[in-house]
Image: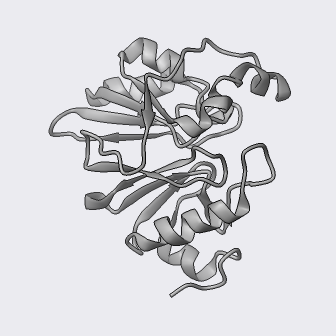
Amino acid sequence: MGPLQCNCAIVGDPLTGKALIVDPGGDADRIMAIIEENGFNVVAVIHTHAHLDHILASAEIRRRTGAPLMVHQGDRFLWNALESQCTQFGLECPETCDPDTWLSDEQLFDCCGGVALHTPGHTPGSMSFWFESHDLLIAGDTLFQMGIGRTDIPGGDFTQIETSITERLFRLADDALVITGHGPSTSLALEKQANPFFGGIS
């Protein structure tokens, strides 16, 4: 979604109709068309972090759904700097609003058995979202296929991201599908063995 092609995810329960929207980075009409086509009730809009490409459509989605916006407080400085982020990339700044709730580590969601994991390193407030019963991990810009998120930007920390991946993410199910913040999905088993940043972890 959006000008920087962020991977937005919609995690929905067809039985209850509840859904979470993760990282609405743009294209609000397209996101809402999927929500409406499936008859979902959006209970929260959750963010892996607050770089502009993951939040550009957040205020518009909130306006249309009434669902609360959630982000970790560690990324408050980025959320508040959306206008300057847009200026840096030559983009028009969309409508903005404050987050409704600060995400916390191990926070449970009332939808699809999801839990929030604080995985700092790309940004101080980076989060990953784990859906254990579905072996689904939404990793944002923490872990990519054969790569990791940048740490050479304000708030980035290589030691933190390395710890977040090895101590939090790599302890989840090996066969978990990993939806990354950009680019193709992957699996934890593949990244343990072949990601050049880790060199093979059993």
Check the image and report above or below for 184 versus 104: below
> What is the number of callouts on the image?
0
Q: Which residue does the image show at 70% across and 74% down from the upper left?
A: 197
Colouring rule applied to residues: one colour
Residue 82 horizontal/vertical position (percent)? 69, 23
- Which quadrant would residue 85 be assigned to in this image? top right
The quarter in which the N terminus is drawn is top right
Does 136 appear above or below 16?
Answer: below
Residue at 42% of width from left, 23% of height from top? 32
Residue 44: quadrant of the picture: top left
In this view, the residue farthest toward the left is 15
Residue 165 image position (x, y, % from top left): 56, 66
Q: Nearer the viewer, residue 56 or 106?
A: 106
Residue 137, quarter of picture: bottom left
Q: Left of 117 or right of it: where is 161?
A: right
| Up-down relation of residue 16 to residue 197 (above or below) | above
Residue 51 position, x and y percent, is 66, 36
Report the residue at 46% width, 20% height from top.
61
- Expressed as whole percent of the image width and height from the top left, the position of residue 176 reads 40, 67
Q: Residue at x 36, y 15 (%)?
A: 66
Q: Is residue 197 toward the left or the right of residue 132 in the image?
A: right
